[in-house]
Each structure stands twice: as structure tokens, then as C-alpha cells.
Amino acid sequence: MSNELIFIVSALIDILFVFFVARRGADWLFGSIIVNLILIGIFGAKLVAFFGIITNVGNVFYACVFLATYFLLEKHGRRMGIMTVWLGLSFSVFFIVLSQLAAESTGLSQSKEVNDAITTLFTFAPRVVLASVIAYVFAQLINIKIYEWIKIRTKERFLWIRAGSATVISQLVDSLLFFTIVFFDLPGPLLIQTILVGWFVKTLVVSTGIPFLYLDAYLERRKL
């Protein structure tokens, strides 16, 4: 299966998953955010080529964190949106502490291949998780601020404008912080490409999910 097809399938599965859990309440949405943040912590350092350009595997997961946040803001209000910031921070710290302790434990020779793979993966994971936490907190706070500001100014109309505007700005902030911290040792042109492609991919994935915000609002009105 090509990287391009994997990207499309992964994005569709994650978007549909977020939509599915949004129909079931705030707790489910928080759960989807936690799962996607953990996936970022595990796979965020993996660089891949999509359509001949370089990016990382975690972009889909990160975009769906923000999509889930929009569902929370629409269905449960700003307070729930702000909770995603501190929830994400808390669980990311929890993940990194326990994963490092598990990785440091001495494995038996019978599981040598697994031991070596875990050591390799989680030696890099702290930088990925640290980068994702820093980028997430700043980008998410900006994201919610812009989203709510536009929502108030437009009297809760034009959902696509507030979601689209918040996404473009917040994902630029996130990409600049995350990729600079994780891939600071890349050559300059490649780092810039990774930042710009990551920004574009995350914006594209969130934009693809915006129609599901409309669908959810329609189903809510019809009490379905």
C-alpha cells in the first residue's frame, strides 16, 4: 500500500472516528484526543514522503485532535475546549514518564529484538512528546481564542469561517514549534519543507472534517 493511500485511509478513519465519538458525548471526544496524542508521541518522529514531499506520520493524528476540539466547542462550550489543553498536557506527561520507566527496565534475552526496538523508539520519544506538548498548548490556546472570537463576532454563524481561520493560524504555530524542536538537526531547506508540508496537511485534514461539524449540527437539530 502506497504512502499516499495510507494517508488518505488514515485521515478518513480518524475523521469518521472523531465524528462517531462526538455523537456520544464529551467524554468520548476527550478519549479520542488522548488516543491521537499518544499516537503522535509514538509515530511523530517518523518522516515519510507523500506525493514526493517530506512530512511526518503524525500530522493526521494531530489534525484530528483539533477537529475533536471543534466538536467540543460547538456542542459543549468554551470551558470544555479549554479542558483539552490541560487534559492533553497531563496525559502527555503521564505517557512520557511511564513509557521511559518501562523502556528503562531490563528485558530478558528471550525478547531481545523487542527490547532493542523499544529502546530505539523511546530514546527519541521524549523529544517528540516534549515538542508536541509545547506546540499543542500554544497552538490550542490560540486555536480556541480565534474560534470563539469569530463565533461571537459572527453571532454563531459561518461555522466554516471560524473553523477554517482558527485551523490555518493554529496549525502554522503548531508546525513551526513542533517540527523545529523535533527536527532541528535537519538541513534548513528540508526543515522548512517539513514545516510547510505539515501545516498544509493538517489544515487539509481538518478542513475535510468541517462538513461533519455541519452534519452533526443538522442531526442535533433533528434530534437524531
Image (cartoon, helix red, strand yellow):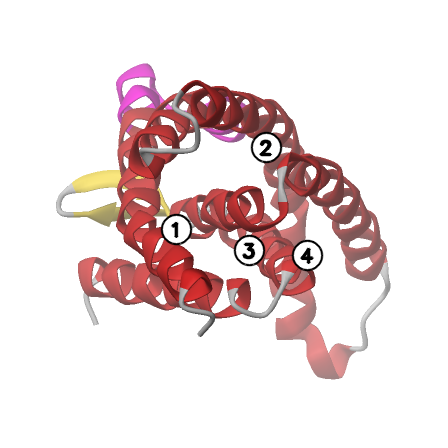
Type of the residue with mark 1: Val
* Vertical position of residue 16 compared to residue 159: above or below: below
Residue that label 1 marks? 60
Residue 119 % position (x, y) = 68, 56
Residue 186 is covered by the magenta coloring: yes
Seen at 56% across and 42% down, the residue is 73
Residue 161 appears in view: yes
Q: Is residue 120 something that shows in the picture?
A: no
Contact (Cβ within 8 Å) of mark 2 with mark 1: no
Mark 2 vs mark 4, CA separation in Å: 25 Å
Position in image of residue 91 (x %, y %)? 76, 49
Residue range (magenta): 177-193
Q: Secondary structure at mark 2?
A: helix
Residue at which label 4 appears: 119
User: Where residue 173 appears, x then y in whole percent?
Assistant: 46, 20
Q: Secondary structure at mark 4?
A: helix
Q: Please tell me whether residue 189 is drawn above or below residue 100 in the rendered image.
A: above
Q: Earlier in the sequence, mark 2 or mark 1?
A: 1
Q: Residue 172 vs residue 99: left or right?
A: left
Q: CA distance from mark 1 to mark 3?
A: 9 Å
Q: Residue at x 49, y 23 (%)?
A: 152
| Location of residue 207 with respect to 221 vertically, above or below | above
Tell me if label 3 and label 4 are in contact, CB under 8 Å.
Answer: no
In contact (CB < 8 Å): disc 2 and disc 4: no
- Closer to the camera: disc 3 or disc 4? 3
Q: Nearer the viewer, residue 55 or 74?
A: 74
